[in-house]
Image (cartoon, grey):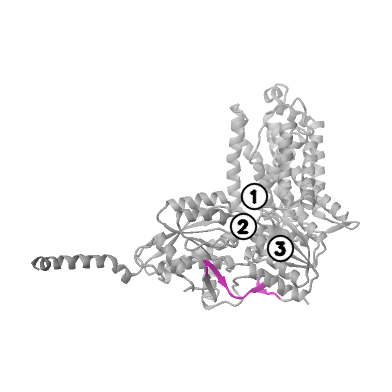
Amino acid sequence: MDLFFEQLINGVALGSLYALFGLGFGIVFATLGILNAAQGTYASWAAIVALAAADQYKLPFIPALLTGVVAAGVIALLVDQVAFQPLRRRGKDMLGALITSIACWIILDSLAGTATGHNSLSFPRGTYPSTMYHLGTIPLPVMQIITIAAMVAVTVGLHVLIRHSRFGAAMRAVGWDQTAASLGGVNPRYVVIITAFIAGSTSGLAGVLGGITTHNVSFMLGEGLMLKGFAAVVVGGYDDVRGTALAGVALGVLEVMTSQYLSSGLRDGITYALLLGFLLLRPRGLFGSLTYSRA
Amino acid sequence: MGNSVRLGPWVFATLAAFAFQTTPALAQGLTPGEYKIGFITENTGPIAQAGQSFWAGAQLAVEDIKSSKYIGASSIVLEPKESGSDAARSIQAMNQFIADRSVIATACCILSPVAGSLKPVVLAAKVPLVIYGATAAGLPQPPWIYSMTILPGPKDTATALLVSDAIKPKTAAYILAADNDAFKGRMAPTQKALEAKGIATAGVVSVLTKDTDFTAAATQAMGLKPDVVLVYATQQAAAGAISALRDRGFTKTIIGNDVLGPEAIYKKMGATVVGIPFPVGFSDTIGVSAQGKSFVNAYKAKFNVSPDSYSAQGYQMVWFVAQGLKSISGTPTRESLSAALEKLEKFDHNVYGGEFMKDGQAQTTGTIVVNWSADGKLVPWTAPK
């Protein structure tokens, strides 16, 4: 039974990474109307910058983590303003933004590969907390606790921001119709800039935490998160962060339990079967609203 | 009679011309020129660290062959095309090499499935292919396909037996890259050998080559309560699995494999990899031959790092092709080069001090079991006291 609970915690921690990444991905889609293929590279870059901060500039864990997170936010903001804003101004549709985001993905991915020498790097021991706690007989690494806590905090924070604040109302208004939001006194450009930064930072947080816990900081880090984060958004529902968080955690637990009790070979297959099932049978996801019609 | 007298000079001249056409090449040896090897690189992707070592070793060999005038005024040129260890990209690159008639031989592959996918393409096109890293049995097929990979399977078994004799485990768990047939093939004989010594198999934990999170796999392996864990996985997966085991507090013996050899692995894993025994086909500090020392010094001078097993294999691969070219008279073709390579049994240039070719597969004698020391050096493994 201990093994079951150990794996359950492993699954929740892994799923928390998917959820964190999915939160950033989902906000961009729901508010800015962009299916951003470059979102994964924000996670890769966050981990690379945080590693440089910790290893080369000897910053402690929290400042290094924040440096990576802020860097991802800034990159997301720059990409949005350089690549997506001109399209928005010309009233281009989602397909144009998707193609542009693929171009951004390729550029940022190549640059990340160059920055890491196309190698997989890792955070040196001592640059992140490594204490092992025990819940009875079950070992609980502190990084797993931090990852789960970060996911809960970001989910609650984003939910409060989007559903219970004036800025959140503005985000939803811009997501629904930018012209109408402007007529209602909202500055769409300001909302878009802040939203892009939040989305990039959130995915960046997943990248830094994922880079530490998996000992893998590379240009490919974001690709894995991208696919699973997308699945979390689809299963959870595009316009509700609680759904994305729950779906991400559920995917993580499902993956780990599949490996433990069935076969590691079936793990990804089950995830994508679930994704396909939701796209076919319940495209709005678990928490998505019925009236939402972005696509 | 008169006619025959008149024809005599013409017949003589014709025969002389024919002889001139065919024999000068025998006397002159290899026609001077630049001979191109189409090199499918794996400098990016999940096993880039190994791929970069192979590529560096091959580049150095090209320079050494030229500076030593091993093939006279001729030289070898490497034409790289990157595959990122992806089978589809590798096939695309190979097709481009096949279409380019200036490419006289090709080299590829670290991953066995990728090498296996190229095999029918190469055999159909009849172009020499020298595999520099893939380890699955049955890949070499002279006269077209050769492998300069030092097969790690027997060395894995020898390492496991050596370590087991020292630490006397009762049970062993295995972490296996289940999507890699080569590692499956390497694990089976070791498992059999350990079981024959009374070391029970506690279980086999499957991971996938492209996995990044190994926490669950480590938990699963530790749940089997083994005395020793043997890791049979590609570089990134092995590094991830070992790190996850240590992160979760597994302090017993872990036995690795040759993928832990490159210096980049020590840089990446640091203290986590210290003390873990694994076999190497080549070490820059242990049991190095004279040619091996020369290789080590030149490699350090050029790349500012020490060579590893992969560098040595990449280096030997180019020398193997060069030796084939050297034995050809006249202008080589893909056909004549493949025939020349098939005849090679001993190597003129040998960094291992005991390498030979058998049935298209390079082999060495002996096993060097090493581990990384705390100061980042490969040292002979000794049993913990």
**Tag 2 subunit:** B
Q: In this rendering, would A85 be left or right of B15?
A: right
Q: Quadrant of the C terminus of chain A?
A: top right
Residue A216's place in the image compared with B26, above or below, is above
Secondary structure category for the residue under label 3: strand
**Crowd class of label 2 (few under 14; some 14 to 19; many from 20; radius 10 Å):** many
Residue extent of the magenta highlight:
B358-381
Q: Position of residue B385 (x, y in %)?
A: 78, 77
Disc number for residue A220:
1
User: The residue under label 3 is which amino acid type?
Assistant: Val
Query: At label 1, which amino acid type do we have?
Result: Met
Amino acid type assigned to the residue bearing label 2 in the image: Ile
**Does the CB distance between marks 3 and 1 fall below 8 Å?**
no
Q: Nearer the viewer, mark 2 or mark 3?
A: 3
Q: What residue would you read off at disc 3?
A: B231
Q: Residue furthest left?
A: B2
Q: In the rendered structure, the residue with mark 1 lies on which chain?
A: A
Q: Nearest to the eye among marks 3 and 1: give it.
A: 3
Percent of width and height locating residue A157? 81, 39
Q: Residues within 10 Å of mark 1 (few under 14, many from 20)?
A: many
User: Looking at the rendering, which quadrant does residue B278 occupy?
Assistant: bottom right
